[in-house]
Image (tube, helix red, strand yellow):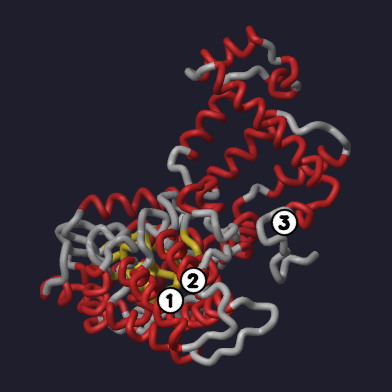
Amino acid sequence: MFDSLSGRLRDAANALTGKGRLTESNIKDTLRQVRLALLEADVALPVVKTFIERIRERAVGEEVSKSLTPGQALVKIIHAELVTILGGETVPLDLKAQPPVVVLLAGLQGAGKTTTAAKLAKKLIEREKKKVMLVSVDVHRPAAILQLKTLAEEIGAMHCASEASEKPTKIVDRALDEAKRGHADVLIVDTAGRLHVDGEMMQEVVAVHDRAGPRETLFVVDSMAGQDAVNAATAFNEALPLTGVVLTKADGDAKGGVALSVREITGKPIRYMGVGEKIDALETFHPDRMASRILGMGDVLSLVEEIETKVEKDKAEKLARKLKKGRGFDLSDLKDQLEQMSNMGGLGAMLEKLPLPGNVNPAALKDPNNEKQIRRQIAVINSMTPGERRFPKTINGSRKKRIAAGAGLTIQDVNRLLKQHTQMERMMKKVSKGGMKNLLRGLPGGNIPPGFRR
């Protein structure tokens, strides 16, 4: 998401190279490029007009300090306005009420409400230590009811059963009663969606809302829906007292305009962002960090937080102890690293959060085959004996042939894995000597993020 917009904004800022200060004449063409970039990214026209005018007011006459070029000065102004348009600050869910606190999810069909309900429940269970119950009132789509039940079992959440023959309001009444008797802290209600906004759907979701009395009413929207998402957001915002927005499918080929438009049009904060199909792929939305990502500055803080929550600490500590004792980084260790990278969304998801040089296009680095490649590498290691994993140098030609056949791959695949292991072994030796700070200093930008100096 935002790859195209990021590139266009960087190009616009670079066009000011050689200027001594920002004036109305020398930023005219630049702002026109910014305007076109935003429109191409599906940002709503009223939002674009307001955004450009704010930048013009702040930029004209702006003195360029000795440490900044005119392009950098403009980027700083755009960053500040992006933070404002995205909400200014992170707004957590308000769960300070008599339990069960009700969170209601609304939106069009296909936006990802059911999956989001489960992702949010998992996040609340693991991060907030809440006891969560899930209930579906989507009586028009029995598969959604079954899907939510399956997901609830997978994440360890409570579930209130419902049937397609029931009235949604009756289901809500029973769910509230079961949540109270089960001492649930939070009740998440997954409502029905339609392919488009219509009166019948709105009447139903309003009735469910009135009966449930939610503390939080979240509008779930597909990041790739473009202008349709803006129209739906307007309709839902008029029908319901929305308290926030959840963006889904942000890892797909989304232009990013929905994030900028929906927040400005509804006036409601974006709370979360779905970044993958996995049940833990839900990120808290930070406007300042997202603004940095849009402008290609990276988001190392979110990457560090993700590492801290998704990396298995016992395995990491075991590896650290092993390296400190001078023992080698073997192929079993590499397998653990590959599996944990896969859990974090693969290489592409990590690259999105790293600050990259201005001449590097992030989209070019995010190969969709990376996840497939990781699975192949794990298959190669699984095809080895414990001895071969521990002592990779013993793997000769005949062993490579056997390993390749066992994994259903080629000898070249085995050779690539062994080469990657050698490279990672060297890197791990550096990390064992200097710790995580040493590794972060080697990232593009070379800075340790605030709050991570330990």
- The total of numbered circles placed on residues is 3
Q: Is residue 104 visible from the viewing direction of this image?
A: no
In this orientation, which residue lies closer to the viewer: 35 or 394? 35
Asked which secondary structure carries label 3, the reply is helix
Q: Earlier in the sequence, mark 2 or mark 1?
A: 2
Q: Where on the picture, by quarter, is residue 3?
A: bottom left
Q: Where on the picture, by quarter, is residue 233?
A: bottom left
Q: In screen coordinates, is 253 left or right of 375?
A: left
98 lies above or below 271: below
The answer for how far apart the CA atoms under marks 1 and 3 are is 34 Å
* Residue beneath disc 2: 15
* Residue beneath disc 1: 30
Determine the residue positioned at 72% across, 30% down: 422
The answer for how far apart the CA atoms under marks 3 and 2 are is 31 Å
Mark 1 residue type: Thr
Mark 3 residue type: Leu
* Residue beneath disc 3: 440
On the image, the x and y values in percent for residue 181 come to 41, 69
In this orientation, which residue lies closer to the viewer: 167 or 426? 426
Asked which secondary structure carries label 2, the reply is loop
On the image, the x and y values in percent for residue 158 come to 42, 58
Determine the residue positioned at 24% across, 69% down: 227
Asked which secondary structure carries label 1, the reply is helix
Image quadrant containing the C terminus: bottom right
Q: In screen coordinates, is 317 left or right of 77?
A: right
